[in-house]
Image (tube, helix red, strand yellow):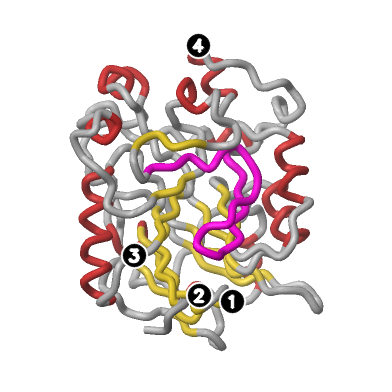
C-alpha cells in the first residue's frame, strides 16, 4: 500500500455497543488486509463512564454498561476513536469539554463544533441536532433531564463556527442535511428502493453542506443508510453517507481509503468489498442490498427526538 495510504472507518450511532463495533473493526481489518488507522463516530455514542449512569440514563438501558470498562481501564480501545455528540450522550461528562477531550485511552470526544486535523485530514464537526426554540438560548449545565436534553441541540454560535471553515475533507454531523431524500427522488436514483420521508433532516446542516462544500459528509441519527451526492456549480462535490445504528455491520460501518487527502475507494460493512472508487458516481446504488436492520438488542429503543426539528 502507498506510504500515505489511510483507512478510515466510520460508525453509525453506537448507543453503548462498544464491544461489537470493536469486533466489526477487527473483521474489516482482516478483510482489507491492513489496520484501520482512524475511527470516526457520528454521535449517540453514549460513553457513560459509570455503569450506574448508563442504567439510569442510556437510550438502551437494558444493555450492559460497556463503556465503563474502558473508562475504568479494564479494556482498551485498539484504535483511536473520535466522536461527536448526538442527542443521546453522557452530557454531564461532556459539558466541561466543549472543545473536546479524551474520555478513556484512545476514545476522544471532538467537542461541540470546530475543526480538527486527524492523520492529515481536515475533519469538521457539529454535535447535536436542530431545535429551533433553543438554537439561540444559552447552553445550561445538564443537571436535570430537561437540561440534559437541551445539551443535545446545537447553538447558532457553533453553527457559525463550522460555516466559516474552508477546505474540509470530512464533515461529521449527527442529523441529516434536509433535502437529500428529495434530491434522490428527483434524480430517480435506485427507484426500486423505498425512500425515507423527504422531510428528514434539518435545513441548518444542509446550509452548512452547501456553504462549506466538504468532500464527504457523514451522519447518523435516523438509523437508516443513505447515500447521495450534493453538487454546486463549479464547487467541490459533497458525497453524503448516512449510517445506520450499530445493530448490524452492513450499514452501520462505512469505510474510506485515502491516499494523501484524496479518497480512492469506499465500502459499507466489514466484508472489505469496494462499493465506490474515485471517478465513479456516488449514490444509493452504492448501498448494500436492502434488508430490515432491526434493533438486535431486545427492549429499549433509541430516542431520536425527531420533534426537535419541527
Within 10 Å of disc 4 (Cα), the crowding (few <14, some 14-19, many 20+) is few
Please identify the quarter of the rendering in which residue 19 is found.
Answer: top left
Residue 258 seen by the camera: yes
Residue 191 bears which disc, if any?
Answer: 2
* Quadrant where the C terminus is found in the figure: top right
**Distance from Cα at disc 4 to Cα at disc 2:** 45 Å
Above/below status of 54 relative to 202: above
N-terminal of the two: label 4 or label 2?
Answer: 4
Residue pointed to by mark 3: 36
Residue pointed to by mark 4: 144
Q: Nearer the viewer, residue 186 or 210?
A: 210
Within 10 Å of disc 3 (Cα), the crowding (few <14, some 14-19, many 20+) is many
Within 10 Å of disc 2 (Cα), the crowding (few <14, some 14-19, many 20+) is few
Which residues make up the magenta segment?
107-128
* Quadrant where the N terminus is found in the figure: bottom left
Q: Are marks 1 and 2 in contact (CB under 8 Å)?
A: yes
Residue 63 seen by the camera: no
Residue pointed to by mark 1: 188
Q: Is residue 163 left or right of residue 30?
A: right
Above/below status of 14 relative to 251: above
Amino acid at each position: 500500500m502507498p506510504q500515505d495510504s489511510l483507512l478510515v472507518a466510520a460508525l453509525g450511532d453506537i448507543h453503548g455497543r462498544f464491544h461489537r463495533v470493536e469486533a466489526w473493526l477487527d473483521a474489516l481489518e482482516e478483510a482489507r488486509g491492513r489496520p484501520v488507522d482512524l475511527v470516526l463516530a457520528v454521535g449517540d455514542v453514549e460513553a457513560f463512564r459509570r455503569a450506574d449512569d448508563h442504567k439510569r440514563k442510556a437510550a438502551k438501558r437494558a444493555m450492559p454498561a460497556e463503556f465503563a470498562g474502558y473508562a475504568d481501564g479494564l479494556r482498551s480501545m485498539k484504535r483511536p476513536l473520535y466522536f461527536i455528540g448526538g442527542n443521546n450522550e453522557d452530557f454531564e461528562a461532556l459539558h466541561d469539554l466543549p472543545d473536546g477531550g479524551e474520555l478513556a485511552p484512545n476514545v476522544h470526544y471532538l467537542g461541540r463544533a470546530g475543526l480538527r486535523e486527524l492523520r492529515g485530514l481536515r475533519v469538521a464537526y457539529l454535535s447535536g441536532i436542530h431545535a429551533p426554540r433553543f438554537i439561540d438560548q444559552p447552553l445550561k449545565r445538564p443537571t436535570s433531564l430537561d437540561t440534559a436534553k437541551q445539551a443535545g441541540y446545537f447553538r447558532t454560535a457553533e453553527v457559525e463556527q463550522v460555516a466559516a471553515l474552508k477546505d474540509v475533507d470530512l464533515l461529521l454531523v449527527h442529523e441529516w442535511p434536509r433535502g437529500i431524500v428529495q434530491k434522490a427522488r428527483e434524480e430517480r436514483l435506485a427507484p426500486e428502493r423505498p425512500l425515507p420521508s423527504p422531510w428528514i433532516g434539518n435545513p441548518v446542516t444542509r446550509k452548512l453542506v452547501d456553504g462549506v462544500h466538504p468532500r464527504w459528509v457523514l451522519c447518523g441519527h435516523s438509523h437508516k443508510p443513505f447515500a447521495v451526492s450534493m453538487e454546486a456549480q463549479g464547487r467541490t462535490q459533497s458525497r453524503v453517507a448516512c449510517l445506520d445504528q450499530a445493530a448490524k455491520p452492513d450499514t452501520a460501518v462505512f469505510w474510506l481509503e485515502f491516499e494523501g487527502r484524496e479518497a480512492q475507494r469506499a465500502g459499507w460493512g466489514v466484508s472489505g468489498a469496494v462499493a465506490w472508487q474515485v471517478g465513479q458516481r456516488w449514490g444509493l446504488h452504492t448501498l448494500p442490498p436492502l434488508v430490515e436492520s432491526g434493533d438486535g438488542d431486545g427492549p429499549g429503543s433509541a430516542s431520536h427526538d425527531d420533534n426537535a426539528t419541527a
